[in-house]
Amino acid sequence: MEKVWERGNLQDLEQEVIFNGTCCFCGACGAFCPEYIFYEEEMPRTRQKCYEIFGACYDFCPRTFLPVFEIERKIFGSVREDKLLGFYRSVCMARAKDEEILAISQDGGVVSALLIFMLERGLADAAVVARKCGDWGVEPSVATKREEVLESAGSKYTQCPSLLGFGSALREGYEKIAFVGLPCHVQALRKVQLSPFFDFNKASERISIVIGLLCTETFDSTLLFKKLSNEGISPSEVKKFDIKRGKFIAVLRSGERFEIPVKEMADVERSACSFCYDFAAELADISVGGVGSPDGFSTVIVRSERGEKLLSDAEEAGFIECRELSAEKIEEVRKNALRKKRRNLKKIQKKAESLKILNLLVKLEDLERLLI
C-alpha cells in the first residue's frame, strides 16, 4: 500500500484538516501523540509544535487521504461492486435475544449482544465504545465487562474521539480489541491498522472485530441542546435520541416525544460531517443501524469473513437472532447512502478546489464508482 500512502507532519495536518474545517474529531491524531495533541471544544489542539518530517497524526487521519480500494483489497480481499453500500457479503436484520439488552438498546441491541458474546467467550478482552457521561456528554471508554457494555448502549448523535479509546486499550495491554465506531472512526482505525510506516505494538494483530454504525451526520452537542432548550427541553430530561422516518426524536423521561424534521437540524450539524461520503461504515467488518428494519431490529451488513463468522457464531450461541431482509428494504438502506453521497459530493468538490480531492485518494476514473 506504500505506493498510495502519503506523508505529512503536524503542521500539514493543521493546514489541511484542523484549520480547514474538515476535522471529524475521531481522535486518531492524539491517540498516539498525547504529549503534543489534546482535545478541547470538539477540536484537536497542540500543546507544542512537533517538527517531525513525517508524523503518525497525519498518517492516521481519515481526512488527509483515504485509499479506499487499497483498504478494501487488504481487508476484504476484493473491492466493491455496490458503490452505495461498499463491499459486503450479505445483509440481514437481527436483534439480541437478551431482554435486558433489548430494553436499553437503540434498535435491536445487536452491537451490545455481539460485544458481550465476544467478551464472555474470550474472543475479545476489551471493547472500545462511546459512553455517555453527565447529561449527554460522550467519552471514549474501554469496556471489559457486560455491565460496562450496557452502560454504552444507545445512540448519542454527537461526536466522540473514539480512537483515543483504542490508543488507551493498546497501552493498557489488551490483546483482542473489539472496536465500535462511526464511519469516520472506522476509516481512521483501518489507516492505523494498515499504515506501512508505523507498528504500534502490532496494532493490526490486536484488533478482533471492527463494528461500524450507520451514520448520516452527528450534531454539535452545544448547538443541539441550545436548540432543544429553545423548546423548553433540558438535557437531563432526555432519555433517548432517535432518528426515524425523517424525524429527529427526543424521548423524554416523562414519556413525551419531541419531534423535528431532520432537514430542520442542519443548523446544529457538525460542519465537518458535510465532507463525509460514507453512510454505511463501508470499511467495517460488520455495519449496523436501524434503517431498513422494523422497530426492534437492526439492519446488519456483513462485509468480511471475520464479521460473517462472528455473526454466525453469536446466532448459534443464542445471543442474537437473524432474519432475512427483503430486497425492498435493502434498497431503502441504499437510498439513504445515495442521499448522503449526493448531498455531500458538491461540498466535497467545492472544498477540493483548494485541496486536491480532499481525502479521497482514488483515480479520477474511479471517483464516480466510489461516490454516486
Image (cartoon, grey):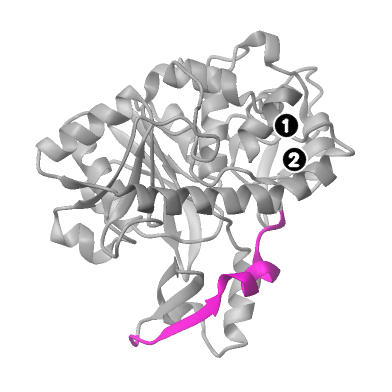
Q: Residue at x 45, y 28 (%)?
A: 171
Q: Quadrant of residue 108?
A: bottom left
On the rendered structure, is 353 left or right of 82?
right
Residue 89 in sight here? yes
Mark number for residue 64? Answer: 1
Residue 27 to residue 260: above or below = above
Label 1: which secondary element: loop
Three-letter amino acid code at the position of disc 1? Thr
Classify the position of the C terminus by image quarter.
top right
* Mark 1 crowd level (few <14, some 14–19, many ≥20, 10 Å Cα): many
Q: Nearer the viewer, residue 95 or 122?
A: 95
On the rendered structure, is 281 left or right of 299?
right
Q: Residue at x 68, y 33 (%)?
A: 368
Q: Quadrant of residue 361?
A: top right
Q: Position of residue 18 (x, y in %)?
A: 77, 43
Residue 215 to residue 34: above or below = below
> Which residue is disc 2 drawn over?
47
Q: Position of residue 23 (x, y in %)?
A: 70, 45
On the rendered structure, is 257 left or right of 15?
left
Q: Position of residue 70 (x, y in %)?
A: 58, 18
Three-letter amino acid code at the position of disc 2? Arg
| CA distance for labels 2 and 1 | 21 Å
Label 2: which secondary element: loop
Q: How many marks?
A: 2
Magenta stretch?
254-271
Residue 266 to residue 346: above or below = below
Q: Residue at x 57, y 88 (%)?
A: 231
